[in-house]
Image (tube, helix red, strand yellow):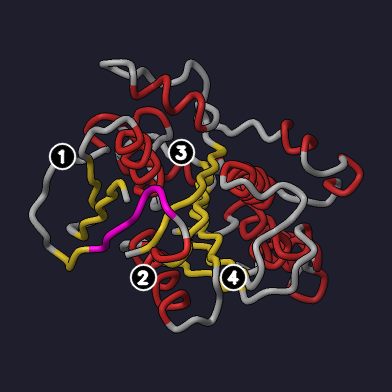
């Protein structure tokens, strides 16, 4: 099991405060606007001048990560021997498409180097480590099938092998006009975006909430997604299970048994 000591969200509906309010509502409604995340509050943690060349995907990553660290009680002082694990379905889509557009418009020899550098999937995790001023192990998992469950397994492995003492686990995806158009053409749910981060440690080192991972195809219990309805509040995205996990943890805080699933894999949160 893993100890969950802090959470942070950057979602279309807001952060943890708004999540708790949504869970108190019997039928959460979708926002009146498109599924976009407002990252202007990132300047509470980082001076605006340092964010001039930071893309939207990375901005969501930074905002949710800072909120998670503060929620865990880490302000200016970060946990020692920390690692960063970032999971995503599509990666930084907008900068990837910008880079491809520059190849189409100007040829491979004149493609945008800035768009290329930001399209590399591990850049947001590396930039997070840079902004936190902590050289630490970091990796990015990019997959459409069970990205959140795989991220939790990676964090659990790092902790059990004592590679690190704390893992800052993030799940991030963004929407773009091209993804929205493709989704509409295929008749799918509206594409959403958002970032969710979790501060994880070995169970014996912290008290509070714990996460237990069950094998694939585990029996389904009370799923947090049935309450939160991530596709309503966040839109449809590969890392939607991260928001269901956050909702599960909030329900457990209130003494309500809850668990969530990602493609048949069970993620159970318990009160330690």
Q: Residue furthest right?
A: 49
The reply to whether the magenta stretch includes residue 167 is no
- The residues bearing labels 2 and 3 have C-alpha atoms spaced at a distance of 25 Å
Cα–Cα gap, marks 3 and 1: 24 Å
The earlier-in-sequence mark between 2 and 4 is 4
Disc number lying in front (2 or 3):
2
Q: Please state which of the two labelled residues, at mark 3 or mark 1, is closer to the viewer.
A: 1
Q: CA distance from mark 1 to mark 4?
A: 31 Å
Q: How many marks?
A: 4
Residue drawn at x 48%, y 46% is: 179
Q: Residues within 10 Å of mark 3 (few under 14, many from 20)?
A: many
According to the picture, the residue beneath numbered tag 4 turns out to be 83
Q: Is residue 183 visible?
A: no
For label 1, the residue is 222
Tell me, for residue 153, which label it has, or none. 2
Helix, strand or loop under label 2: helix
State if disc 3 and disc 2 touch (CB < 8 Å). Answer: no
Q: Could you tell me which residue is drawn at 80 percent across and 63 percent down? A: 133
């Amino acid at each position: 099991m893993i100890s969950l000591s802090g959470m942070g969200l950057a979602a279309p509906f807001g952060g943890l405060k708004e999540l708790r309010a949504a869970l108190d509502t019997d039928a959460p409604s979708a926002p009146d606007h498109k599924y976009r995340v407002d990252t202007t509050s990132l300047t509470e943690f980082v001076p605006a001048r340092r964010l001039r060349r930071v893309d939207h995907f990375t901005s969501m990553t930074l905002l949710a990560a800072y909120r998670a660290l503060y929620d865990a009680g880490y302000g200016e002082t970060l946990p020692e021997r920390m690692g960063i694990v970032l999971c995503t379905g599509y990666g930084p889509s907008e900068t990837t498409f910008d880079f491809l557009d520059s190849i189409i418009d100007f040829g491979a020899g004149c493609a945008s180097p800035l768009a290329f550098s930001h399209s590399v999937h591990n850049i947001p995790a590396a930039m997070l480590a840079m902004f936190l001023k902590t050289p630490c192990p970091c990796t990015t998992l990019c997959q459409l099938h069970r990205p959140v469950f795989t991220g939790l397994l990676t964090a659990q492995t790092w902790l059990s092998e004592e590679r690190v003492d704390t893992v800052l686990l993030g799940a991030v995806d963004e929407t773009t006009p091209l993804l929205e158009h493709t989704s509409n053409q295929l008749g799918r749910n509206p594409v959403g975006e958002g970032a969710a981060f979790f501060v994880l440690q070995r169970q014996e080192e912290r008290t509070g909430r714990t996460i237990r991972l069950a094998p694939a195809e585990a029996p389904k219990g009370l799923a947090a997604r049935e309450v939160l309805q991530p596709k309503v509040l966040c839109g449809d995205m590969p890392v939607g299970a991260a928001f269901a996990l956050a909702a599960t943890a909030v329900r457990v805080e209130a003494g309500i048994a809850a668990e969530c699933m990602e493609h048949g894999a069970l993620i159970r949160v318990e009160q330690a």
